[in-house]
Amino acid sequence: MTKFSQFIEQDRNCLWHPYSSFGSDLPLYPVLSASGVYIKLADGRRLVDGMSSWWSAIHGYNHPKMNHAVSEQLKHMSHIMFGGLTHQPAIDLASKLVEITPESLKTVFFVDSGSVAVEVAIKMAIQYWYAKKQANKQKVLSIRHAYHGDTFAAMSVSDPDNGMHSLFSKALVQQFIADAPECTFEQACLESDLISIQKQLKANHQSIAAVLLEPIVQGAGGMRFYSAEYLTKVRELCNKNNVLLILDEIATGFGRTGKLFACEHANIEPDILCLGKALTGGYMTLAATLTNTDVAQTINQGEPGLFMHGPTFMANPLACSAGLASIEILLDSPWQQKIKKIEQFLKQGLEPCRRLAPVKDVRVLGAIGVVELHKPVDIKSIQPQLVEQGVWIRPFNHLIYLMPPYIINTDELNILIQAIYTVISKIKE
């Protein structure tokens, strides 16, 4: 038995992977190391990473400045409880987030993952209205094709029919769901795009605490890009109907769409903002929920006079050190030019896929390239073919997409693009 196959056998004996059955026979690839944009498998093959480890490793792997930040922090402490104690990495990272996010956001609540950041945002919104003596405002309004995470409140505001969580529907809090806009990123927002959310707010604003959206890009719910004008109009509708606006920038934050934060495309500010994924450059799990002074002070002044949440590993010093290093690396680089170059190359390179029979659509925004197929991807067949092409791309549903590290060069991008074209061209209708 080779070391490669031994890895796989040991894994299948005890490990359960995301969105899979235990002991699944889906393709599995043991990894020995990763550096730059390359993943080295146990059998010696090197793969160009097109996923940034689910959109988080924006600087690639094994970055010397990131490594240094984490190793230096290890000399002091790897973790310390955040209840009644504080530390410099948390203070520095929170200060940096307040500096670079929309101006009105002044407070930072650290959590462990993106799903929990959404949970915290929903709790903040509900507790805000409770403190304002409007305890009936307990619901959230989101839109179809949304994905906000796998924990229970996050599942309840994701797409109820076409999402990954329909089997839990009877266990979930029933939220309000509006139709998603049909306007694409390049188009104007039409009145028809707003009818559904307008109706929901008009009829239910007295019980809605917040509207929750992924700004500009709906990620795992379909990689849909919608008009910035829609986001502007929703901000106006929230103000008009006396509800908060929560923006989930877990996938879009830190430059992915060409703006530091996707809400900047619409020049609007949320009441509550969720960040995660690229926050630590893919080094450690850490997320954050930011809010404005009004929300924070209102919660403080209401009953019970404090915010009701507190994770054990909140503001972990190692993760905070990684987060600060990642942001500094990003802001000290010509990241706008990098994203623009990736965008232009993806547009040019993926466009020929449009002529292939299995392809329904091709779309690109910032460092996101999407090829949508007419039929769902057969992951058991497609994944090995992509690996044989020397790339790591993880399709889902009808989509084969790219969200590569920002450090990727054009030769490496071309390898990814050619792999997608080659594999799709072999799909039999």
Image (cartoon, helix red, strand yellow):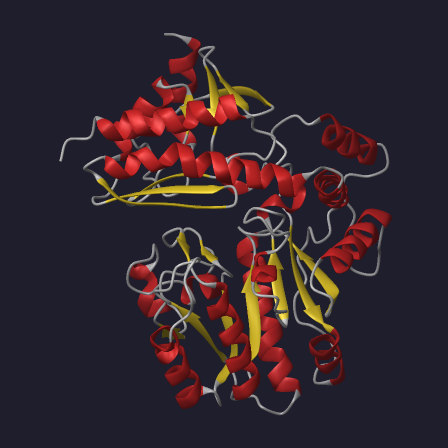
Q: Position of residue 187 (x, y in %)?
A: 41, 62
Residue at (62%, 79%) from the top-left corner?
A: 127
Q: Position of residue 172 (x, y in %)?
A: 39, 68
User: Residue 401 versus residue 421: which sits nearer the camera?
Assistant: 421
Query: Horizontally, is 264 left or right of 354 in the view?
Result: right
| Observer-nearest of 268 and 48 | 268
Residue 228 image position (x, y, % from top left): 50, 64
Residue ID at (47%, 10%): 44
In this picture, is 277 found above or below 184? above
The answer to whether 79 is drawn above or below residue 177 in the figure is above
Q: Quadrant of residue 169?
A: bottom left
With 17 as the anchor, is 109 left or right in this view? right
Above or below residue 252? Residue 196 is below
Q: Quadrant of the N terminus?
A: top left
Q: Is residue 27 visible?
A: no
The quarter of the rendered structure image containing the C terminus is top left
Quarter occupied by residue 192: bottom left
Residue sitting farthest toward the left:
429
Label tally: 0
> Whole-percent x and y of residue 143?
40, 68
Position of 313 with respect to 202 (left or right) is right
Residue 335 visible at all: yes
Relative side of 45 to 429, left or right:
right
Residue found 77% across the figure and 51% down from its top: 93
Query: Where 399 falls versus 167 (above or below)?
Result: above
